[in-house]
Amino acid sequence: MNCEVYDGVPQYGYHVGVTPSGEDIEVDLRKTANFNMAAFGSSGTGKTFTLRKLIQNFWRGNITVIVPDTQGDLGADSPYDEIPNAAIQEEFFAYQNGTVCLNCLDISVVGKGSGFYPAIQRALRAIQYFHPSMGVRQKSVLTKVLLDTYARFGIHREDESTWTNQPPTIDDALETIQYMLKEAYTGISSNIYRECGELSAKIKRNRAKIDRMHNAIAIQMNDSFENGDFESEIDSQKDGAEAAEKKLEAEIEELKVKASKIIDLECSGNGERAGEELNISALLGVEQVLQQMSMSRLFSGSKPFKPAKGVINVLNMQGVFEKDQQALFFLLLGRVFNDAMNECRILNKGIPETILVCDEAKLYQSVCEDSMSPFPRIVTEGRKFGLGALIGAQSPNQISREILGNIATQFILPLTRSEWRSAKNVFGLDPAHLEVIRPKSDGYLSINGKKPSPVHLWAWEPMPWSRDIASVA
């Protein structure tokens, strides 16, 4: 898909409305303490409209915008009235093949949080988000499964050069635990099963490599060429593909021999006995979790998420259950933060490169467990890496104090009466302040911790208030 990047002068100052006296109000991200913004308002007050307005402005700043869309309010079919449709790249998460996925067994090899050990910890936490009730014994089994799965793909903790190998997926982890279950049931060492698994993974990689070689040959043959050197280059590539195919055939024959050996061992009961007792109950519990994750196709599909630079990247999650969204949030937010760190060339540059949009903040509370969780780190540390967050919430109570204290730009729209006390505590707004603002029109704006001031949102001319704002402002 060809996405359209804004080709004008990047804009970082945005008109957001007028004061009661008609003065323009602008938010300039170059002057705010950080790039974080939030809109607080009950349902139907214009919160989502405000988020869309800001997202459109971000696009005109050549900012990469990443939008997990859980409600369907921020996707390509939403009423973005100021930008071309091509400014939006929308991908869909769904329980089927062909949709976008996030591989929780990926290994980052650059920057902070990279390496084998962080990859194991990240995979463990993502799987626990998917299945929070996992017990201690199951977690121990899962760790062993992950280590063995990486080993099957030639990735080893002690050998850093192997960390760039093609990473396995949840499907491969499921295959690993099924080998372990065979060991537990038969009492025969799983070495032979694992040898088959490693060879099977190798065959899978080589098949993909051969497919890429044939595709490259086909592309070059379709291009026009005039000299013999180009023909010899194609001939050389064909020779390479044929050699790879012969090697693949030999590996398949070797796999058949090993599979036959497994059948003989299982039938005779002979062979090397298992060196350690595996808890079948714990194995079955972990297998069930991995089966569910594999069947979901959210973590092991063929289409990994790759955000396009300078456009609005919408990840449509409408078709995903809220409980399954938590693991996706953990992986996505962690990746956004790590990418910002690793791609940053100038610290504290003063202008944002990436903005993460999180509507309905209550959905993200599980990924705010502590200060080192992905969401708090984006908000509290993101500015120096050119990263910010735009948050939508129906109540300030849905956001932690740590995060609230790091949001430089705050839009306060009409709130339900039950939230007026929290508005008083957080924003210093009395009930009298909140009574005078109308849905989809009025609000208060606080920038850099200053006292909230009244604003006619997204208006260009002063409008009458429902009562005299001067008496409460």
Image (cartoon, grey):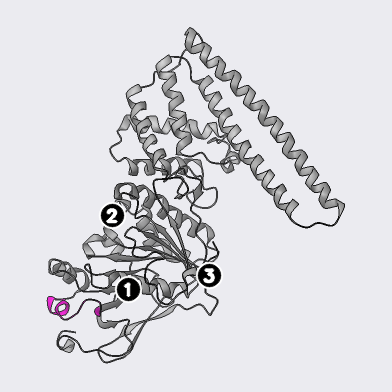
Q: Which residue, given by chain and number where applicable, does mark 2 sit on?
A: 365
Residue for badge 1: 50
Amino acid at dot 2: Gln
Q: Measured from the top left, where is residue 94 in percent x and y? A: 39, 49
Q: Position of residue 230 (x, y in %)?
A: 82, 52
Q: Secondary structure at mark 1?
A: helix
Residue 464 % position (x, y):
21, 89
**Seen in the image, is 383 located left or right of residue 412?**
right
Distance between the alpha carbons at the discs numbered 3 and 1: 22 Å
| Mark pair 2, 3: CA separation | 33 Å
Was residue 188 drawn as part of the magenta stretch in this picture? no
Q: Residue at x 47, y 29 (%)?
A: 176
Residue toward you, 349 or 270: 270
Nearer to the camera, 305 or 376: 305
Work out which quarter of the rendered image holds the N terminus and state it.
bottom right
Q: Earlier in the sequence, mark 2 or mark 1?
A: 1
Circle 3 residue = 4
Q: Is residue 113 visible?
A: yes
Give the image quarter of residue 135.
top left
Give the residue type that dot 3 points to: Glu
Q: Which residues are magenta?
A: 430-443
Q: Are marks 2 and 1 in contact (CB under 8 Å)?
A: no
| 295 versus 287 height, above or below | below
Drawn side of residue 199 relative to residue 239, left or right: left
- Residue at 32 percent across and 40 percent down: it is 131
Mark 2 or 1: the one toward you: 1
